[in-house]
Image: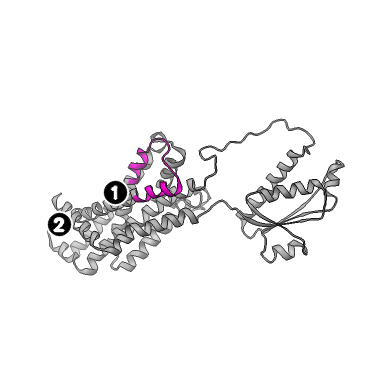
Amino acid sequence: MKKLLSQCKKELTQFGRDKLTLALAFFLPLLSLLLFGYGVRLEIKNISLVVQNFDNGTLSADLIDRIFKNSQFDAHKWNGKHPLESALDTGYAKAAVIIPPEFSREISSGHQAHFQVFVDATDVNNARVIKNSIIGTTNGFIAANHLAVNDPVFNTDIRLWFNPGRKESLYVVPGALAVCLWIYPSLLAALAMVREKESGTILQVYASSITAVEFIGGKVLAYLIVGILEAVFLISTAMLCFGIGFVGDPTPYILGALLFVLTAVSFGTMIGTRTNTQSSAVQAVATGGFTTALLLSGYLYPIRNIVYPLSYITVLVPARWFVQLSRDAFVRGGGWSYDWYLPLILAASAIFFFQIARKNLSKMQLQA
């Protein structure tokens, strides 16, 4: 235990002396959090749309007004050539609404009226949003003007739960915390391990009486402390900048964050024992850590949307479980009854990566 603590103290001393490492530990995670928090938007808004109206009636004016007031559209009146050729084909707009002549008169006389909507479907998700928004706007227009032929048998009363204001930061920022707390502690630990090889000090470790557990454990403990400081710094910044806060019991998240940082550090240490240069360590962490945390954790895309066989690989991605825990802590507030198994998965992941790192170092000691 004494050798482990001595190794930890040495690592923290070296960490404090290196200004570049300090920047990597705190400035870059802060920058990443702000970029993710302010730059990532999953709800599409301000979609360019043009409206060409050949009708001068009040009902068509009301329909156009409702389209213009839809916050998802950046709508403009179109008085030029056919918008399908001159607006959609040129990329000026993503959708075009054409209201034919006699639209208002047809409705007023009790006849069925039609209007056309052309949607650019090169982006399928974008096209789906436009379609649903137009349908919703049309339904509102019909209801407001009492144009339904028969009264519906029942009405659906929809209420948004957990996030009634549709505040997107409540979804984006907790996931961004998970990505940042995975990539930077693991990167710091991997670089610290590789520096021992590049400087040649790893040979002194092989020649000394320190065991692989003590050496690896000292590094993991040192960067666990750094990772905890990173977590406190980033979570405090997220609360201050994005207005998020804990919902319900925060203890599952606190324990889960501790275990998640431990898992990230153990993963980085494992990478460091398998690579020999800092550039290869960075590439390994970026590919095996950052890419999977970004794409296979449920941060950007729901897990159910990830196709087979990658959907099964997500089970092995620790960031997936912490994204779930983070969003529950800041949005849903399920507490221990809902999150009890997530810290267990993270603890098992940390042990798994630590054991691989220990075995890798033990093999290197034997070869030396």
Q: Looking at numbered disc 2 in the image, what kind of residue is underneath it? A: Ile
Q: Nearer the viewer, residue 75 or 314?
A: 75
Q: Is residue 27 a member of the stretch shown in magenta?
A: no
Q: Nearer the viewer, residue 121 or 327?
A: 327
In the rendered view, tell whether residue 289 sits above or below residue 248.
below
Q: Mark 1: which secondary structure?
A: helix
On-image quarter of the C terminus: bottom left
Residue 2 relative to residue 25: left or right: left
Q: Nearer the viewer, residue 255 or 48?
A: 48
* Residue at which label 2 appears: 210
Q: Position of residue 336 (x, y in %)?
A: 38, 35
Q: Report the span colored magenta.
A: 233-257
Q: Residues within 10 Å of mark 1 (few under 14, many from 20)?
A: some
* Residue at which label 1 appears: 351
Q: Is residue 238 a member of the stretch shown in magenta?
A: yes
Q: Residues within 10 Å of mark 2 (few under 14, many from 20)?
A: some
Q: Looking at numbered disc 1 in the image, what kind of residue is underneath it? A: Ile
Q: Position of residue 182 (x, y in %)?
A: 37, 54
Q: Residue at image x 63%, y 56%?
A: 47
Residue 106: mark in rendering: none
In the rendered view, tell whether residue 149 sits above or below residue 87.
above
In the rendered view, tell whether residue 148 sits above or below residue 364.
above
Residue 98 relative to residue 36: left or right: right
Residue 264 relative to residue 135: left or right: left
